Image (cartoon, grey):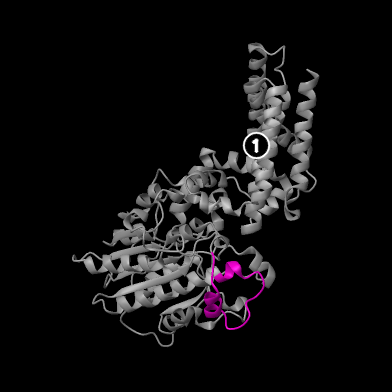
Amino acid sequence: MLSLLVAYVLTGVLVQQTQVYFVAKDLRPNHRSPKLLFLQTSLVSVVFILALVLSHRPFLSCIITLAVFAVFLVVNQAKFKALKEPLVFSDIYLYLQVFTHPRLFLPFLNIPLTLIAIALGLSLFYLAAILESSLKAYNIIINLIALGILLALLDFMIKTALKVKLNFQPVKDIKELGFFNSLAIYLIQALQKPNLDNFKAYLDKQSPYKLAIQSPAERPNIVVIQSESFFDPRPLSASITPEVLQFFDQIKTISMQHGKLNVPAWGANTLRSEYAFLSGINNQELSYYQFNPYQFLQKTPSISIVSYLKSLGYRCICIHPNHAAFFKRDKVFPLIGFDEFIDIHGFDSSQTAGPYISDQAVSEKIQTLLKQKTEQQPLFIFAITMENHGPLHLENYTATDVEKLYCNKPPKQHHDLTIYLKHLSNADRMVLNLTASLKNQAEKTWLCWYGDHLPSMPAVYQALNWQDGRSDYLIWHNQVNHNPTIQKNLSIEQLGLDLLIGAGLAVANKS
C-alpha cells in the first residue's frame, strides 16, 4: 500500500503546484484557509479515487487525475490570453461544443504545448498501464470502502461549497478560493434548486418587458442586427483608413440615435450580450448565471423583448447562419417568443465570405422576408451575423488588402487586425445595402444595429495598449431623416428599450 500513499500524496502536491505556477499571475491564489485547502484536497481525492476504482493502479490513477486537472489549466490559459477572462464553471457546458464546432475553439489553444502535453500524458499512461501491476490486496471490499470515502468527500465538498460567499467576479474569486475550488463552488451553488428558482423569479420580476401597452398607434416592422464583433476600430491606429466604416458613418448622421455600447463580453461570449439585449437585464445581475444564461433557460418560458412584441401581434423571426443548436438557441429561443429560427440550413453553402456565411447573404435573407410579407402582421427580425467571427489568425490577406485598408504603414501585430478590417468593410456594406433596401419599403421599418463584442485580437490590443471594450450601435428608420441625431452612450440592456420608445412601442409603466 506504500505505492498507493506515494501516488496519492504526489497527486495532491502536483495539483497544488500547477495551480500556483501554471496560471496567469493575476489568478494565482492568495493565502487560503485550512477549510479551503481541504476542499481542494477533497476534489483531487474524488478524481483520484474514481480513477483508482476503475484501474486498481495507484500511479496510473495519479496520471489520470493530473490529466483531468491539466485539461482545465490548459483551457484556462487559452481563454485568459484570448478573452481576458478565466475559465468559469459554465464553460464546461459551452466547450463541449468543441466536438461539433472545433474551428471555434481549438485554434485558441497553445497548439505546441497542447500536443506536447498530450504526447507526454499518453506516454506516461501507456507506461503505467503496462508496467504497473494492480494492487494485490484490491478486491470488492476495498472498492466499497473507496466508494464510501468518495461519498463522504462529496458530502463534505457540497456542504463546504454552500457556505462560501462568492463575489461573482471570476478573477477575484479565483485569487481568494483557488482556481479548482472556484470551479467546484460555482458549479455546486449554481445547481441548487433554490438558486435556480431565484434566478428565474428575478428575470420575471426585473424584466422591463413585463407589461405591454394595449393599443400602439402603429406597429412598424423592426429589424435588429447583432453584428459579429462589430465596433469602430479606427481609434486603435491612425493607420486604419477612415473609409473602412464610411457607410456606417453616413447612416449615423441620419439615424435617430447612435453611440458607444457597453457590452458584457470581450472577444467572444456572444450569448451574454445577446441575452442582455433580449432580456433587458444587466448581465452582471444574473449572479451564477451571467456567464451562460441559456444553459439554464431551456425548460421554462421567460420574458423578453421578443415575447413583448409577440404580445403586440408581431411575427418574430431569428436569422443566424450557424447551427441553431449552438448555445442551445434552438431550445431557448422558442421559449422567449420566437416563432421561427432560420439557421445555416436556410442558406446556400456558397454564400460565404471567408469561412462563414457572408453578411451580404444575411442582408438578402432579411430583404426577402420583408418583400414576401403579404399579411398585415408586422415583423420583428433579429439577425445574428457570423462573417466576422474568428479565429482571425487562420485566414490570410493580400498586399492589395493592406493597401486598401490602411492609409499608411500598418501597426505591428496587424495580421488579425487586417483580416478583421476585411470583414468589417463587408459589414459596412451590409449597413448600406440594408438601409437602401428599407428606404424602398412602403411600410415603416426600424433598424437597430449593434456589435456584440470586440473581436479577439489579444496581440493587437497589447501592441496598441487598447483597453476600451465598448462596441457601437445605431437606431434608424426608413421614413424620416433625423437632424440632428442623438448621440447617446448606452449599456446593451437599455438598447431595446430605446428602440421601442423610438418606434412608438414604449413599455407600459409598472405603476
Q: Given the current orientation, which residue lies at the most extreme bottom position?
A: 483
Q: Quadrant of residue 497?
A: bottom left
- Residue 205 at x, y = what percent? 45, 54
- Residue 504 at x, y = what percent? 33, 73
| Residue 86 appears in the picture as rendered | no
What span is in magenta? Answer: 396-418
145 vs 117, nearest the viewer: 117
Query: Image point 72% across, 22% down: which residue?
Result: 131
Q: Quadrant of residue 18?
A: top right
Is residue 502 rendered to the left or right of residue 2? left
237 vs 80, nearest the viewer: 237
Query: Image point 36% across, 76% down: which residue?
Result: 433
- Residue 84 at x, y = what percent? 64, 59
Where 75 sits versus 355, above or below?
above
Is residue 147 rendered to the left or right of residue 263? right
**Dot 1 corresponds to which residue?**
68
Quadrant containing the N terminus is top right
Is residue 243 rendered to the left or right of residue 85? left
Crowding at mark 1 (Cα within 10 Å: few <14, some 14-19, many 20+): few
Q: Amino acid at mark 1?
A: Val
| Residue 275 is inside the magenta segment | no
